Amino acid sequence: MAEVRLVDIEKRYGNFLAVPQQSLTIEDGEFLVLLGPSGCGKTTTMRMIAGLEEITSGDIQIAGERINDKPPKDRDIAMVFQNYGLYPHMTVRQNIEYPLKLRGVDKAARTKRVQEMADKVELGALLDRRPSELSGGQRQRVALARAIVRTPKIFLMDEPLSNLDAKLRVTMRAELKHLHHELGVTTVYVTHDQMEAMTLASRVAVMREGRIVQLDTPKKIYAEPANLFVAGFIGSPSMNLVDGAVRNGMFRAEGIEVPVSLADREGVVIGIRPEELEIAGDASASINGKLYALELTGDSTLVTLRSGQTMLCARGPADFEAPIDAPCHLTPKPGARIHLFDRASGQRLDGTRH
Ligand SMILES: Nc1ncnc2c1ncn2[C@@H]1O[C@H](COP(=O)(O)OP(=O)(O)OP(=O)(O)O)[C@@H](O)[C@H]1O
Ligand SMILES: [Mg+2]
């Protein structure tokens, strides 16, 4: 177990700045998720920690020791690569067994452990196949099993579930969560699935263009996104974000009037999550428009309202029905969080309760 500290690390590929100077401390035993869109520097950050990518400047410390010049094999890190990185000439069994063999674990213990891991990732019947004889999702599970077959100082997992079907992904997510609870190994986990980030992380680092734009618990990131980027990225369906202005304690945009506690100001974006809006009668509504679409999700109905150029989505009851283009009225639920952002900078201005 170990704390991982990145101090002012920077990565350039030629002239291209992939990760600008940044610092991050991953606490001992923490499950830290790097979340961000494609190309934002997640894999690069992981590979720098693993020692597979040279850092252009800065320091990396593991358990207080500067390890910049330590070769990957001496860092005691187990990694799941985004592209699996399996040994093609080895069978599934040999792939999973390999880290144990390297460390001189005896044959009987190895065999038992490999079988346990293969069962955990539901590959028990495929142990004698080679990677080329497996589907993408099966290969990914071999990579996962190979990483978790022993207890390292640090786990680095780069999109380890991205190729699994929805059901298996949920099962494996629970396995990983349990494993982390059992072993308490410091884990850095990359995903662009925000649901995975929310459910697994002790803290989430939301990245954009190489920079961490918010680092916080999943709860805090959901409840108080620091800027428009995070607000739009976390939550499904996304937070409704509408441009307008505040005058006399009222946020106004076409078809929208919501009381807020903010001084008069132009260039304000209001943010309200779909689950915090409810369908209202016209007299009490603060958002008025026409019904644009209804989507039944099973346990609820997503109600999209259109007002001028603006679309807003509310999560309504499963049995809600109305004709498309009929007048539609929404209002924030009592106690709903109203988020306010500055249009120009994208930064959070304030939050109020409805
Ligand atoms: N060897 C390389 N040479 C030049 N540029 C690179 C190299 N590797 C990565 N990059 C660039 O660095 C940036 C970050 O890449 P990285 O692989 O870290 O992204 P990522 O966040 O892991 O994305 P994804 O979600 O698609 O895996 C990208 O713009 C990428 O094109
Ligand atoms: Mg990547």
Image (cartoon, grey):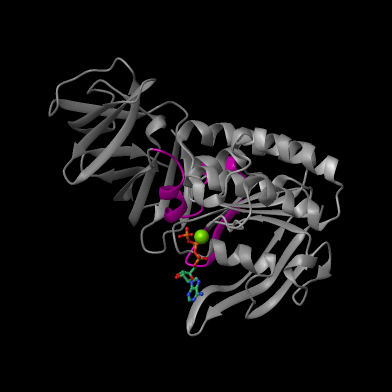
Asked whether 239 or 283 is in front, the reply is: 239
Observer-nearest of 101 and 322:
101
x 74%, y 45%: residue:
149
| Percent x, y of residue 117 | 70, 38
Give how far across and how far down residue 113 sits, in percent: 77, 39
Q: Quadrant of the C terminus?
A: top left
Q: Which residues are magenta?
A: 207-236
- Magenta segment includes 308: no
Q: Is residue 87 above or below residue 128?
A: below
| Residue at image coords 47%, 67% | 209
User: Quarter of the image holding residue 330?
Assistant: top left
Which of the 4 image quarters holds residue 175?
top right
Residue at screen point 76% across, 66% down: 73
Q: Is residue 107 visible?
A: yes
Q: As drawn, is 78 to the left or to the right of 273?
A: right
Q: Mark yes or no: residue 122 visible.
A: no
Percent x, y of residue 322: 19, 20
Q: Is residue 279 left or right of residue 151?
A: left
Does 266 sit above or below residue 285? below
56 vs 327, nearest the viewer: 56
Residue found at the far top of this picture: 319
Total count of labels = 0
* Residue appearing at x 39%, y 20% in the figure: 299
**In front here: 101 or 20?**
101
User: Is residue 235 positioned above or below 303 on the image?
Assistant: below
List the single residue furthest toward the left: 325
Give residue 323's position: percent from left, percent from top. 14, 22
| Residue 233 part of the magenta-drawn span | yes
